[in-house]
Amino acid sequence: MNAATVLPRVQPHRLPKVCVAVTARDGDELIEKAEGLVRDNPFVEFRLDYLTRPGLALPKIKRFMDLHPHIFVIATCRRAAAGGKYRGSVASQIDLLGKAAAMGCQLVDLELQSALRIKPKQLEKLRTRASLILSYHDFKATKKLEETLAKMTPFQADFYKVVPTATTLHDNVVLMKFLEKASYDHSMVGLCMGEQGIISRALSVRAGSIFTFAALVPGEETAPGQVTAKMLRDLYRIEQVDAATRVYGVVGNPVSHSLSPTVMNAAFRRESVNAVYLSLHAKTLKDFLACVREIPISGVSVTMPYKQEILDSLDNTDAHTSKTGACNTVVRSQDGKLYGFNTDIAGVVRPVEQRTSLEKARVLVLGAGGAARAAVFGLKDRGAEVYILNRTSSKAEKLARQARARVLKKADLKKVSFDVIINATPVGMNGKDSPLKPDEIRARIVFDMVYDPQETRLLKLAREKGLEVIPGSEMFVHQAARQFEIWTGKPAPADEMRRVVLMELQERSALRNSKKTG
Ligand code: NAP
């Protein structure tokens, strides 16, 4: 084909929503990875800049393109100065992209910095060979997006890609508003990098981004905060996200360890609820509150350290929240009001009541923190006789006064027995310690709120004594199920939620063990 022939442009509406970035050291590895993913992913990006000798990979790319004419491929050779790995000149970068286009890649990605350094004719020539994505990445912040686009649009491109970094949750809102406006006039691609950019990774396609990027597998991310294509599809169901999709999430600092996104997205999927649940890492509550109304977010699970702090921002709360002084669930109503609920109480009470009546039951709660408060008030409400034992006795006394419960001294542990003992301290999270010695475990049922590891030392000791045990995952499932009910008005698929929690905990445990051994 001669240089004057203009190829048909790639039509934005024909592109899949997810483009998987493929990196490799040589052409064989690149093609092997691409072959492995094309069945499920008809849209890939070849990162030529990761190859030690990109030129050698070109014939292999050609063979691959001939074999897979139906898939879309972007060739990218990002220079180091723009955040990539390519150390060659701009001229050789353009040359490589042109050759990749000649091998069949329908799209090429060129950063603004390089476009500014070449002659308009060179860019025009490149664009006769493939559709052009003109891109700009800001690895530090989300700012001056309109100004950036204004620098890009004098160059004729098929797609304008603007990728800043989110340092707050609200940066996602800024990016998505920008995309909404810019996509009236241009075919835009945009998302925020960074851990806090997850909102835009899942939602920017409905804000006007033609597609988004994903990693092939964990560890092969080509940008900070990138998630895998499998996560985008299976967890966040990006193919189904539309204007009607409701947004939920877990807000906290940190939240990366939270089981909630896995469990809640599975529940939404099982019950065909058009909703997505995201991890909302908010460094301040103010940042989160600024997003609630703008995204908008329909509901959140609240976790440490915001369970108390959020109370001041709520328009109303349920009785459980007022009693415990802690809120773990927020609903945003149509008129924008925020209502607070506490489902930790259901998380404690439901699994116990499935095994025994709480009316007049003698229950010992270990701990006097947030989770213990939910347990003590919930159990008292159900008519249980509650005892509290805490490392700091003054806190146990205060809670006992507020909830009309009793305090137990450590020395008296061996003298009394209970129907249920509940551990509401973190002791046991290390997989070794138990808050009680074997002769101090005098009860019919032992409930450990610690859920990771699933089988704590306390539960192991209780089992050895032939006692019934309730693992912390049960509390997790029941409090999450109650949240699902509050948000959707539907019964929660608790069995599915339990299955997903247990699978995730097993995977985490296997990962820990493999790290220890390997
Ligand atoms: P918190 O508010 O920080 O309270 C922690 C409590 O544990 C305090 O009473 C503290 O005693 C006590 N404690 C901490 N370290 C201790 C130690 N080494 N020895 C003895 N006592 C100790 O925490 P929280 O929110 O109540 O959470 C407590 C546990 O419940 C955590 O492990 C959390 O993961 C678990 N939890 C599980 C679920 C679930 O869904 N399964 C839900 C919520 C919480 P002092 O007063 O003396 O500091």
Image: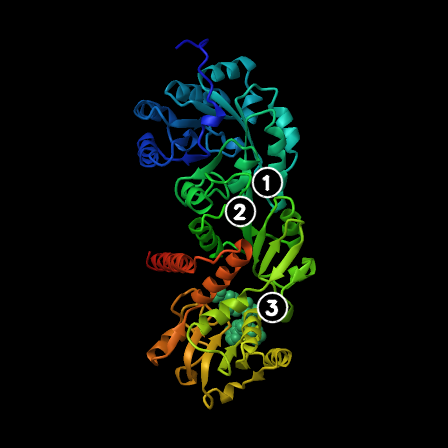
Q: Earlier in the sequence, mark 3 or mark 2?
A: 2
Position of residue 99 measured from the top left corner of the image (x, y, whole percent): 40, 19
Can residue 503 be seen here? The reply is yes
User: Picture quarter containing residue 414?
Assistant: bottom left
The image shows residue 325 at horizontal and vertical percentages of 64, 68
Residue 140 circle label: 1
- Residue at 56 percent across and 60 percent down: it is 303
Q: Relative to 408, is 66 on the left or the right?
A: left
Q: What mark, if any, has residue 295 been given in the picture?
A: none
- Is residue 253 depicted above or below 458 in this figure? above
Q: Does the residue labelled 1 lie within 8 Å of ligand 1?
A: no
| Amino acid at circle 1 | Lys
Q: Mark 3 points at which residue?
A: 320
Of the image marks 3 and 1, the number of the one nearer the N terminus = 1
Q: Mark 2 points at which residue?
A: 195
- Looking at the rendered structure, the kind of residue marked 2 is Glu
Residue placed most toward the observer, 186 or 362: 362
Instruction: Identify residue type, mark 3.
Output: His
- Indicate the secondary structure of the residue bearing disc 2: helix
Residue at 32% across, 31% down:
31
- Label 1 vs 2, first from the N-terminus: 1
Residue 114: image location, x then y, percent: 54, 24
- Classify 10 Å Cα crowding around label 2: few (below 14), some (14-19), many (20 and above): many
**Residue count near mark 1 (Cα–Cα under 10 Å), binned few <14, some 14–19, many ≥20:** few
What is the distance, in whole Å, between disc 3 and disc 1 at their CAs?
42 Å
Q: Can residue 426 be seen in this view?
A: no
Q: Give me the C-alpha separation between circle 1 and circle 2.
A: 13 Å
Q: Which of marks 1 and 2 is in front?
A: 2
- Dot 3 and dot 2 residues touching (CB under 8 Å): no
